[in-house]
Image (cartoon, grey):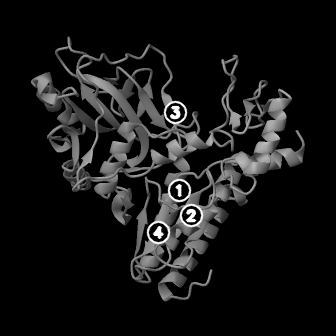
Amino acid sequence: MSDKDEEIFREGLGFFAGPELRPVALALINSYSANSMWVGCDCQPTERIKPRLIPVTNAGFRRDPDPPQPPLVPHSDVCEFNQDPVSATRVRASYKRRPRANGILKFRLARGPSEETQVRKPNTPVERINRSTPRPGLARMLCELLTEARVQEINPEDHFPTLERFNAMTGRIKAAATQIEIADGRFLNDWIAVGLSELPALKSRIAAENADDWGASRPHGILLCNFHDIRDREIFFNNDQISPVPVLGRIAVFGEREAANRHPYLAICLIGKPDAKSSYPAVLRAYAHPCMNWAKWALTDSILERETIDAIQRCRFGLSNRDIQIRLTKPLFDMNVNMEGETQPACIPDFLIEVLSRPLSRTVVIETMGYTDTRYRNRKLRLKDYFTAIDLRRSDKLARLIHHDPSQFGSEDEAKREFYKSLRDDIISINNGTDQF
């Protein structure tokens, strides 16, 4: 393939494709299809067999042959051709907040009692979830709870976990659960265990329920708990005196790169009877996401994001000496920024900073550059227009984007100094009303 053909395909059919070059790209697709040609994608450079792109006349690329012809190599998570436009739209929709009726959000996560839970086989790898895959139902419920309970707002004291702060957080989560209906007339606050200590009571209540009273669902509830690791089919805790919790079905874990170990995690587990013959509930399936610490369940995507939080908190302390207060948030949902183009990614910045003394001023968007490979960095950089357009929903100014990118500096100390200076200066200028960037 020539460099010109590759550019046409990327600009007309890739992840950030716009409408201008799509007709040109489809004409090129038709030429490749007429000559029975397919494309080997270079997104997996270490693989001997390349991921395939099969031209489909007047449509674009199909990712795999039909019928499948193994061996098949999947496209990289950050490949521009990882998804077709229809799939990309479906993925983005799963990262949007769900509509509420009179303040009530309906989730139907449990099947009827006649349907058996599909039990995972031993040594089955956990399912890895990232922003290129749809967000599972359990994950969507978790994100709704944490957003409503303001857990994703990170305060100065959150680095110092205490039981008092933990109890305050779980109280807000239970309050948010009153707005979620899990079956007709049944609300989550009556069927949630926040922490392992509440799980036995929840299981007993579920066991005592009549399945006929739950309509098309089955008696079930939700467990939220902090844990250390998942191995095979069990959730392990950072305490040898606590027995691992077995999970019968699907286990999904958020993580952009599989090898990373990002404990502590927060798990949301579906609790119910595996089938109509079972007498006692079990964990049917689970979703896990890295979080800050045992008393602050704000979800974080990587270890480097936690380092970004530390860096922001250091700057926050310095700003407080100037009587400048900020709000730091880790958003979980698409910000609904719409740009021209056929396919659009979910716009979810890593962090948002608001200057509280100027509530309608510019937002500062912080993006953590977690990896050094070219495809990852290019995709992050191409999201700039989406992130800076966040403020255009309420003003005529663009948001300020700052990258936390330690790999671009000669030493860790230099990286910290430069990030601190850049963030401090921008926030001061916003506070003083002198921002011209």
On the picture, is 214 further left or further right than 412? left
- Taking depth in this image into account, of 266 and 81 the one nearest to the observer is 81
Q: Secondary structure at mark 3?
A: strand
Crowd tier of the residue under label 2, counting other residues whose Cα lies within 10 Å: few below 14, some 14–19, many 20 or above: many
Q: Are marks 1 and 2 in contact (CB under 8 Å)?
A: yes
Q: Is residue 329 above or below residue 286?
A: below
Q: Pointers 3 and 4 in contact (CB under 8 A)? A: no
The residues bearing labels 4 and 1 have C-alpha atoms spaced at a distance of: 16 Å
Check whether the beta carbons of the residues at disc 4 and disc 1 lie within 8 A of each other: no
Closer to the camera: disc 2 or disc 4?
2
**Identity of the amino acid at label 1?**
Cys
Residue ID for mark 1: 347
Which residue bears the numbered disc 3? 128
Q: Nearer the viewer, residue 91 or 144?
A: 91
Instruction: List x then y, in percent, for residue 47.
Output: 75, 27
Mark 3 or 2: in front is 2
Q: CA distance from mark 1 to mark 2?
A: 7 Å
**Image coordinates for residue 24, horizontal then vertical, percent:** 79, 49
Q: Identify whether 300 is placed above or below 63.
A: below
What residue did someone put label 4 on?
A: 353
For the point 13% across and 23% down, which residue is it?
A: 212
Q: Which mark is residue 387?
A: 2
Identify the image quadrant of residue 258: top right
- Name the residue type under label 2: Phe
Q: CA distance from mark 3 to mark 4?
A: 29 Å
Front of the two marks 4 and 1: 1
Badge 1: residue crowd in 10 Å (few <14, some 14–19, many ≥20): many
Tell me where residue 374 appears, x and y as whole percent: 74, 48
User: What distance separates the C-alpha of mark 2 from that of mark 4?
Assistant: 13 Å
Number of other residues with Cα within 10 Å of mark 4, as a class: few under 14, some 14 to 19, many 20 or more: some
Q: Earlier in the sequence, mark 4 or mark 1?
A: 1
Residue occupying the point 18% across, 18% down: 280
